[in-house]
Amino acid sequence: MNPVGVHALVWVGGWSPQECELAVSSSKAAGYSLIEIPVLDPARIDTAMTRETLRRHGLDAACSLGLAHDTDISSEDPDRVAAGEKLLHRALDVTHDIGAAYLGGVLYSALGRYTTPPSERGRRNAAAVLRELAAAAARAGITLGIEPVNRYESNLVNTAEQALDLIGDVAANNVVVHLDAYHMNIEESDFRAPILRCGDLLGYVHVGESHRGYLGTGSVDLAALFDALAETGYTGPVTFESFSSAVVDPRLSSTLAIWRNLWSDGMDLATSARAEIASHLGRR
Ligand code: MN
């Protein structure tokens, strides 16, 4: 049975105690067993409060982030690499302190548009930082996920194949591929081949639509995606990701180019997506 999760941005844009309570209780009420909490700014997360709220509602958590250009570990600028390394280790501490066992996302570069290709030196910088991060994560019992994103959100890892290459260079056994249907729909040739290619190294999956709105109303081939997950025997988390201008995180929404109001009722959206996911998982 795959744990089924939902991204916190379906509910809230911030992480005050009230927002945490709303996000965690709503995730539970909508039928999810996991909430994904963005840690772009680790200082924003009150870890004791978050851990207690999760415990009270019986919900698991996963953490995710994308670096910024001034914390880009794939840069050739040592100051940016050092700032990114510091941020990643603080995010790892938050992941551990809230009781989560997974930190994924764009851990390897800035989440944002690049106007030049990646450099070999920058790529080596990213692999070196991730190797140290993976060692620290292993000591804390945490798995790291490399999420390929579309070409407008990173220049370094846009496909599953590139994620596998980077993971090969990091050479740690607690680093997995984190695939996202929204990005796959843009960059991969199909949904099946990349999933089978990852095999046992696939560790986390985002389901999101081509327009990042209601699941099942866009051009993502959900049947092909879930069939491939079943074919490869994937038992990891499947987390619904959706964004609308109705719920804004100043750190994340503009970076993801969330300009349109694709939904305004998070509960209706999340309940609908949960049923859509159940229909696909139930077909196995
Ligand atoms: Mn994603």
Image: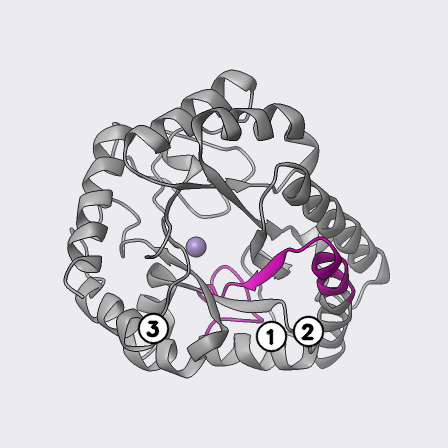
Q: Mark 2 or 3, which is nearer the eye?
A: 3
Q: Residue at x 75, y 50 (%)?
A: 89
- Quadrant of picture, ligand 1: bottom left
What colouring method underlies this structural image?
one colour
Q: Name the kind of residue labelled 3 in the image.
A: Gly
Q: Secondary structure at mark 2?
A: loop
Q: Quadrant of the N terminus?
A: bottom left
The percent coordinates of residue 23 (x first, y second) are 42, 28
Q: Secondary structure at mark 1?
A: loop
Judge left or right: residue 15 versus residue 77. left
**Residue named by callout 2:** 172
Taking the spot 25% from the left edge, 34% from the top edge, the residue there is 263
Q: Quadrant of the C terminus?
A: bottom left
Answer few, some or many: residues within 10 Å of disc 2's Cα (few below 14, many 20 plus, some between 14 and 19): some
User: Percent position (x, y) of residue 3?
Assistant: 37, 51
Q: Magenta residues, as a range?
A: 132-159
Give the mark toward the camera: 2 or 1.
2
Other residues around mark 1 within 10 Å, as few (<14) / some (14–19) / many (≥20): few
Sequence-wise, the earlier of marks 2 and 1 is 1
Mark 3 neighbour class, 10 Å CA radius: few under 14, some 14 to 19, many 20 or more = few
| Residue under numbered circle 1 | 117
